[in-house]
Image (cartoon, rainbow, N blue to C red):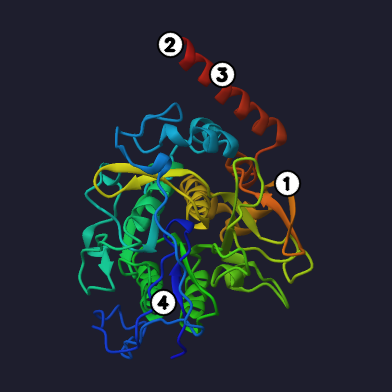
């Protein structure tokens, strides 16, 4: 097996520990899909570790207060992210375009696990027999202490802020320090595909393509399952499988049609300093297939708290949540396998051009949830405009009631 670096792609936890190759406990068989008997640990070919740490808003945490905001009354949407949700037009989506709020759509979060005791996850997790911890070989994918502590919890909570009635399938493949075995990631993708996931969220990546992970993503794509992957935070080439998802040459593949790679911009639609990218003259026409907001994003963290994180890891689950909203509205029954392309093609043209180390970079396509849903639901311009008007009227009524 080729040795690759597998690292959580969040600026908030850039501390990656490289472990020596050796025998690790093998996870229980996952329907025989993946042979993980080698037990090899992911390593960096260059022996290079990133340094950095956890970034919390104003240097600390806030207590969980139910998360209720003007967006809805689900208790999942944090008012601290109001500026982000306003720019993504999430209010329009929740109030007019996707009133099911992603109901019962299963989103597998393959990560460091989740703190399933956090209040945000009450009635929002899949049945326990669908959970798995590929690191500890048990059915309790709980976060463990380390530099990456809380990463999976915040990623899952961002999905739920966009799609509050979705169901999270927690699968742990990374240790507490954010490193893991590429075979575990591949096995988790197959596990999720076999247990009802409609969307798979990967806020992780490798510097070089992993044949195991790429093959697992392709298998999921061929079964009509969407995969969202973060692009990474090295201000360099995107990590895999996000990079593969962006490529359409020499011809579109199941992966490029069903998967989305996501980079990060600031609240002002400027490239985040850390976000990976593709040069304007590179193999991807628009520099990055898709971007969303990845700075100062509040999410749930272990201990019934919330905190703000930075990273493409935070931008990607917004796209996963948007896909869940559309799936719950029955779009897949009408036009199966089109949403990944739809979410890209309907995105906002932001023209976020910049230069990195003398190389021109072009970020054109930023997530717009309302526009995506209008397109996916095949609404006319007039219908979409009316939805915006109705949502604004509802907001004005709520403000009057508060006064």
Is residue 317 depicted above or below 180 in this figure?
Answer: above
Secondary structure at numbered mark 2: helix
Is residue 340 depicted above or below 304 in this figure?
Answer: below
Residue 393's tag is 3
Is residue 264 depicted above or below 62 in this figure?
Answer: below
In this figure, which residue is indicated by the disc labeled 2? Answer: 401
Residue 73 at x, y percent in the picture: 37, 29
In this figure, which residue is indicated by the disc labeled 4? Answer: 186
Dividing the picture into quadrants, the one containing residue 261 is bottom right
In this figure, which residue is indicated by the disc labeled 1? Answer: 349
Q: Separation of disc 4 and disc 2 at Cα?
A: 51 Å
Q: Separation of disc 2 and disc 3 at Cα?
A: 13 Å
Do the numbered discs 1 and 3 sit on residues whose CB atoms are within 8 Å?
A: no
- Earlier in the chain: of badge 1 and badge 4, it is 4
Q: Separation of disc 1 and disc 4 at Cα?
A: 34 Å
- Earlier in the chain: of badge 4 and badge 2, it is 4
């Amino acid at each position: 097996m080729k040795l690759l670096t597998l690292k959580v792609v969040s600026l908030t936890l850039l501390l990656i520990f490289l472990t020596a190759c050796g025998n690790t406990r093998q996870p229980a068989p996952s329907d025989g899909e993946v042979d993980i008997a080698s037990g090899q640990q992911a390593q960096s070919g260059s022996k290079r570790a990133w340094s950095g740490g956890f970034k919390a808003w104003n240097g600390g945490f806030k207590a969980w207060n139910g998360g209720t905001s003007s967006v809805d009354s689900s208790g999942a949407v944090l008012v601290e992210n109001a500026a982000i949700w306003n720019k993504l037009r999430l209010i329009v989506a929740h109030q007019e375009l996707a009133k099911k709020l992603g109901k019962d759509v299963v989103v597998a979060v393959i990560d460091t696990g989740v703190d399933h005791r956090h209040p945000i996850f009450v009635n929002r997790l899949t049945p326990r027999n669908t959970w798995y911890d590929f690191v500890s070989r048990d059915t309790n994918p709980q976060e463990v202490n380390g530099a990456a502590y809380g990463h999976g919890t915040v990623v899952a909570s961002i999905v739920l802020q966009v799609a509050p009635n979705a169901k999270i399938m927690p699968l742990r493949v990374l240790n507490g320090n954010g490193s893991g075995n590429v075979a575990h990631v591949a096995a988790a993708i197959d596990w999720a595909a076999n247990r009802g996931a409609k969307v798979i969220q990967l806020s992780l990546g490798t510097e070089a393509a992993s044949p195991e992970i790429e093959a697992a993503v392709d298998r999921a794509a061929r079964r009509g399952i969407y995969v969202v992957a973060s692009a990474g935070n090295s201000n360099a080439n995107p990590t895999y499988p996000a990079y593969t998802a962006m490529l359409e040459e020499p011809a579109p593949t199941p992966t490029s049609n069903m998967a989305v790679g996501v980079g990060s911009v600031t609240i002002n639609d400027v490239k985040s300093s850390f976000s990976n990218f593709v040069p304007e003259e590179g193999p991807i026409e628009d520099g990055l297939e898709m971007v969303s907001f990845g700075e100062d994003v509040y999410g749930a963290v272990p201990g019934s708290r919330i905190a703000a994180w930075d990273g493409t890891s935070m931008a990607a689950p917004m796209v996963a949540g948007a896909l869940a909203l559309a799936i719950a509205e029955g779009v897949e029954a009408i036009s199966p396998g089109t949403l990944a392309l739809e979410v890209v093609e309907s995105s906002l043209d932001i023209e976020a051009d910049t230069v990195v180390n003398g190389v021109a970079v072009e970020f054109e396509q930023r997530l717009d949830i309302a526009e995506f849903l209008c397109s996916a639901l095949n609404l006319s311009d007039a219908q979409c405009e009316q939805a915006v008007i109705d949502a604004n009227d509802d907001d004005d009524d709520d403000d009057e009631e508060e006064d």
